[in-house]
Image (cartoon, rainbow, N blue to C red):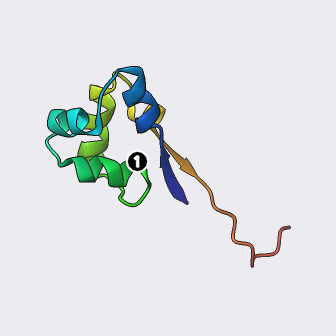
Amino acid sequence: MKLRNHIKQHRARLNLTQQDLAERTGVRRQTILAIEKGHFIPSALLAFLIARELGMTVDEVFEISEIKNEQEPTP
């Protein structure tokens, strides 16, 4: 499974920079960048804070997508 997010799109809608969102959630800009690129999975608390600052629910900002293992046979 992979955690995907829509932070960048929602930031743009609100005219927020990564720095703005980082300051509002108490993390560094690099953390927001890493989350947006899928290199870092936020804690439940940080996911909630990000969603709240974007005016959305965690489910609206983050989604779990399944990655199919190509080595497994399909039924």
Identity of the residue drawn at 17% across and 46% down: 27
Q: Position of residue 63 (x, y in %)?
A: 51, 43
* Residue type indicated by callout 1: Glu
Q: Position of residue 35 (x, y in %)?
A: 36, 51
Identity of the residue drawn at 82% across and 75% down: 73
Residue 21 lies left or right of residue 51; in this view the side is left
Which residue appears farthest toward the right when viewing the image? Answer: 75
User: Element under label 1?
Assistant: helix
Which residue appears farthest toward the bottom when viewing the image? Answer: 71
- For the residue pair 51 and 30, the one nearer the viewer reads as 30
Location of the C terminus (image quadrant): bottom right
Count of numbered circles in the view: 1
- Residue 23, relative to residue 33: is it above or below? above
How crowded is the residue under tag 1: few (<14 C-alpha within 10 Å), some, or many (20+)? some
Q: Quadrant of residue 11?
A: top left
Location of the N terminus (image quadrant): bottom right
Q: Which residue is mark 1?
A: 36
Residue 74 lies left or right of residue 41; in this view the side is right
Identity of the residue drawn at 42% across and 21% down: 13
- Residue 59, relative to residue 71: is it above or below? above
- For the residue pair 29 and 73, the one nearer the viewer reads as 29
Identity of the residue drawn at 39% across and 35% down: 58
Residue 64 lies left or right of residue 35; in this view the side is right
Q: Position of residue 50 (x, y in %)?
A: 29, 36
- For the residue pair 17 and 68, the one nearer the viewer reads as 17
Q: Position of residue 4 (x, y in %)?
A: 50, 48
Q: Quadrant of residue 51?
A: top left
